[in-house]
Image (cartoon, helix red, strand yellow):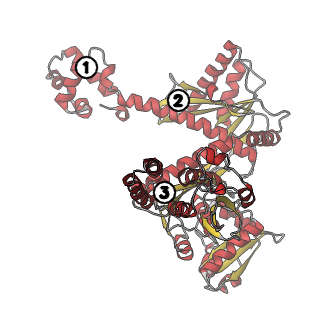
Amino acid sequence: MIKDTVFLNNLPNKPGIYQMLGADDQILYVGKARDLKKRVTSYFSSKEKDLKTSYLLKAAVRIEITITHTEHEALLLECFLIKEHQPHYNVLLRDDKSYPYILITDDKPYPRITFYRGLKKGKGLYFGPYPNATAVRETLHIIQKVFHLRSCDNRFFSSRKRPCLHYQIGLCSGSCTGLISEKEYQENISHAILFLKGKSQLIIHELEKKMAQAANALNFEFAAKVRDQIQILEEIQAKQYISTEQKNADIIGLVLEAGVACIHLLSIREGRLLGSRSYFPKVPMGASEHEIVSAFIGQHYLGCEDIPHKIIVGEDIEDKLFLEETLKIKIIKPFRGERRKWLEMAESNAKQSVASYLIQKTNVEARLQALQKALSLQIIPNRMECFDISHTHGEETVASCVVFNQEGPVKSDYRRFNISNITPGDDLAAMRQVLERRFKRIQEEGKPLPDLVFIDGGKLQLKAAKSVLEELHIKEILLVGISKGEGRKPGLETLHFLNRSPLHLSSDSIALHFIQQIRDEAHRFAITGHRLRRDKKRRTSILESIPGIGAKRRRALIRHFGGLQALRAASIEQILEVPHMTRGLAEQVHESLASFPKLRLTE
């Protein structure tokens, strides 16, 4: 985009929205601002731009602005335009479903309780919105089990001459045939409303009084029935009540993996975990985590009837004050305590949702087809393997091999290899060793070879892999190297081949996302094995490796010198002062400690 100084100088210092348009007048990006002049001119400052902004400025040819009266109007207009035009460089929350509610109708004399989704047109009490339909159905089942309210429609209700199956299994009071009085049913309705408002303790107190009255009147059958209600409510309260500090809060956990962004939302109302839901927004290349969370908050809560007092996030949001003032909320990034545990739970759920999304059969099929097209393969690969190396400054090198087929990851075929007898930090030697061991084993056992092998690395790693396969007379495998791009940012990877030019896939390519998924899985598997091996080694005293130094002598040495650092600095004569030490052992200890790297000294 060419910098238009006249345009920038005449921008107003007022709230509004700005639209960046491409050559064909297509809207590329929509942004909001409390001060249009400051926000728009910031794009043309000398400050280094992130990847997404750089690409956006290259593609945009002009900017249009719309001034609004207030910041709230700017946020409203931004969200409307994003949903209407779905610009390529905006984070898009793809969620057109209305939220589910619980509805208690105003039908007389026996109101019903039911699942409801849509505009609130009918009369009655609406509770929600709930984060998902499962949370609604679980809550409805609890209410029917405890308070025995009817859920059938009016036509079914009016035509009954005997109670239905719900009455037989204890989920209804049989109001259709008059088996419960209007007064008692209305009491149950009142208790159900209190329960939905999170006031279970108040209901329990009322039921305890009711039980005592029934017991005093020698109505033990009714007293036992009320007692059972109390027990169920106490069990539910113990499971659902999670916080004494916060009544209403939403927790937003974000995970970015293999080209997929997942936001997991936990909803807490009146101190109870109401439910959770995962969202998969469309994310442009180079979008930062704080930008994704900020876009989600704006698009999700604008116009929402149930906005919590506080929103817990894991990112520092640039327009935090803007969102707080507009939506009348408090955005908090916790570092410790109960809120931090909530955030970790949300992030853990987001990670699990991404994993489930990635292994869905339809999703894997689409990625395989995209991979076939991107790599110009004649057929869809049936078996793929990816190799990665992990170490810390050459220490305890571990290689991994992960396997994918046409159904996704084949975890039973994953393998780790402890690499030895190489120069520490020599990744090429490590790659040669793991490939040689892997494919020799396959040949010896007569197992099928993979169609496609990914190597985490560039040309050098690819040539090392080629030399190993040639030595083993294996020619039918396609080798692909994956090197990271500038700043190791996802979406900038380069694919290397032996007999063709390198390939750069677009950051939104499904094929690239699949390759990232496989590569990241190999990296995760390698680094987990490396850390286990490294930590085990560091927990082991180096004294244990010295012949003749048993448990008693080790304890005596550590007790005498106070630690390995002091022992390492000691002379042979000083070591001889330790009880039960001989000169030969002292010399051996001194020599072993002197040659051992400081990095690996542990007690």
Which residue corresponds to mark 3? 272
Q: Is tag 3's residue or tag 2's residue first in the polypeptide sequence?
A: 3
Q: Compare marks 1 and 2 and give the one earlier in the sequence.
A: 2
Give the distance between the C-alpha atoms of the residues marked 3 and 1, in whole angstroms.
53 Å
Q: Which residue is mark 1?
A: 551
Q: Looking at the image, is mark 3 or mark 1 nearer the viewer?
A: 3
Image quadrant for the C terminus?
top left
Amino acid on which disc 2 is placed: Val
Residue 470 point in image, percent of width and height: 72, 21
Residue 81's quadrant in the figure? bottom right
Dot 1 surroundings within 10 Å: few (below 14), some, or many (20 or more)? Answer: few
Residue 398 as seen in the image, left or right of residue 555: right
Tell us which disc is closer to us: 1 or 2: 1
Reading the image, the residue beneath label 2 is: 398
Give coordinates of residue 303: x percent, y percent: 64, 72
Assess whether mark 2 and mark 3 are in contact (beta carbons under 8 angstroms).
no
The span from disc 1 to disc 2 (Cα, nearest Å) is 30 Å
